[in-house]
Image (cartoon, helix red, strand yellow):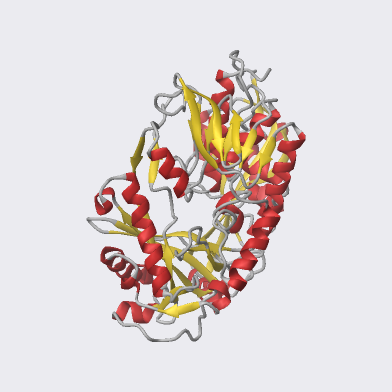
Amino acid sequence: MDSIKSFVLIKNIKLPVNASVSEAFSVAKRTLKRVGLQSYAEEYSIFRRSVDARRKPDIFYVYTVAVRGDFPKFSEEQGIRLGISLHTPVSMESALIGDTPLSAPPVVVGSGPCGLFAALLLAEWGYKPIILERGGSVKDRHAQQMRFERKHILDTDTNIQFGAGGVGTFSDGKLVTRINDPLTSYVLERFIEFGAPEEIRYIAKPHVGTDVLSVVVDRMIDRITELGGSILYHTKYLSPIVSGGRVSAVLTSKGEIPCGALILAIGHSARDTYENIIRSDLSVEAKSFSVGMRIEHLAEDIDYALYGEAAGTEGLGHAEYALSHDTKNRGTYTFCMCPGGIVVAAASEEGGTVVNGMSYHSRSEKNSNSAVVTTVFREDYGSDPLSAIEFQRKIERAAFGAGGGGYAAPIITVGDFLAGKCGTSPSRITPSYMSGSNVKLANPESFLPNFVCSGIRSALVDFDRKISGFATPDAILTGAETRTSAPLRILRDKDTRTAIGYENIYPAGEGAGYAGGITSAAIDGIKSALALMKNYSNK
């Protein structure tokens, strides 16, 4: 009988949150026994664990158990009925290598998750990539961010948006993705290899936390350099030097660098790079994105609203949510939820106020926050990529003004916002932006378009029906959230992944308009590296 060197997944094992992992394994063993496969099992582990809080006060963990072994084939129909499926992990061992020699090492622009994973794979296959990073190292970034928060002096190249690890380094480090791609598990395994906690392998909503992710990023960069690659910090990519549809070198802020192939993993906030690209021969189109504010609640309030009396149960962690509200015209939704986190100053341009969410691995801060954002369509700003950038920039400058300058953030209580007034100071829930020391009460209409404000108002009422207390009057809204995704897309060929009209430029990741979040950006970087490898030799 044919064997499959893989493992089987036993799904939908529902147990109380206080049940032990061994009880999940016992259920899996009984299920395998029913189909005559238990004797082939060699090792049991948790593949996925999610929380089912739909029937409070009873809260359950729902497990998927992975069982490694040399399993004979079995009836697919029987497997579906019993919640059993075969699973084969992704391997890079069979990656295809091309015959065309590279004239120079490949250059990767950007060291966010897309650029790092692309460069790591290239380095492991002997390509010795060069990473161009406009910002500084993780250590530099922490120093500059502390300086920014203390003295309100912004470094426009080394900040929360730019530097080693990209914007994800200063975030919750969420690894959730809406794409269903086999490479997801591969990305999680690589993160664990470089220091992320093993729990990200199986929890349904894995996160790393900014403190752990900083270590992971440093270790990934160390591995790349150990394998012959390099990273050039404080080196801004300016433009490619092209002949006959091929890049031969790139112009940077520190001079010209030979380039055999170019991966553009620029991130979604490099607006000066965007402007250079738009004015070049690369094909670019504007796209929709979203803008809004950050909402903060007490973490314990959200925990109780979602978990009831089970809130605080050891191992359960803080509650998470993802909400959406659609009208006939556009949608408003929560984004990048940070349980037990803080709202951070994420500006990258002088005279603009931008907020984002961040948490440490422990998620031990007093508040939970998320973005509440409304969709902006191309017709809202004129369908032109430069107009899309200017739309975001205008909001940030207006928010800077509404905060009174000095990168203070404009805030308002939810009660005032819904009542169409402004003036109530924070009380039970206090803003976490710059530790609450650099905020100012302001009406969001002074920096957000009317359709965004009306969309958020409507959504808050709807969200309160879904999560009791979501629109509590003393919750805090902080603006402006503008960097949810790239405002444009650099067009590429579907099969080769190369930029339209070019043989060796590979636009990739969130900044190129093809990903949204750490995991999907990493996957896009891996696929772009594989496409490059398929075309070019590593000799």
Above or below for 483 versus 476 = above
Residue 519 in which image quadrant: top right
Judging depth in this view, the residue of 195 and 394 nearest the camera is 394
Q: Quadrant of the N terminus?
A: top right
Judging depth in this view, the residue of 299 and 346 nearest the camera is 346
Residue 182: % across, % down:
55, 35
Tag count in the figure?
0
Judging depth in this view, the residue of 490 and 406 nearest the camera is 406
Q: Residue furthest left?
A: 328
Q: Quadrant of the C terminus?
A: top right
Q: Residue furthest top?
A: 99
Above or below for 454 versus 50 = below
Q: Write the residue at 74% across / 31% down.
A: 228
Q: Is residue 278 left or right of residue 73?
A: left
Q: Residue furthest right?
A: 226
Q: Write the residue at 57% across / 42% down.
A: 253
Q: Write the residue at 54% across / 54% down.
A: 161
Q: Is residue 418 left or right of residue 494?
A: left
Specify whether residue 186 is in view: no
Specify whether residue 395 is in view: yes
Q: Write the residue at 67% across / 40% down.
A: 231
Residue 491: % across, % down:
39, 33
Above or below for 23 versus 512 = below
Residue 29: % across, % down:
67, 42
Above or below for 5 versus 373 = above
Residue 485: % across, % down:
43, 50
Judging depth in this view, the residue of 11 and 103 nearest the camera is 103
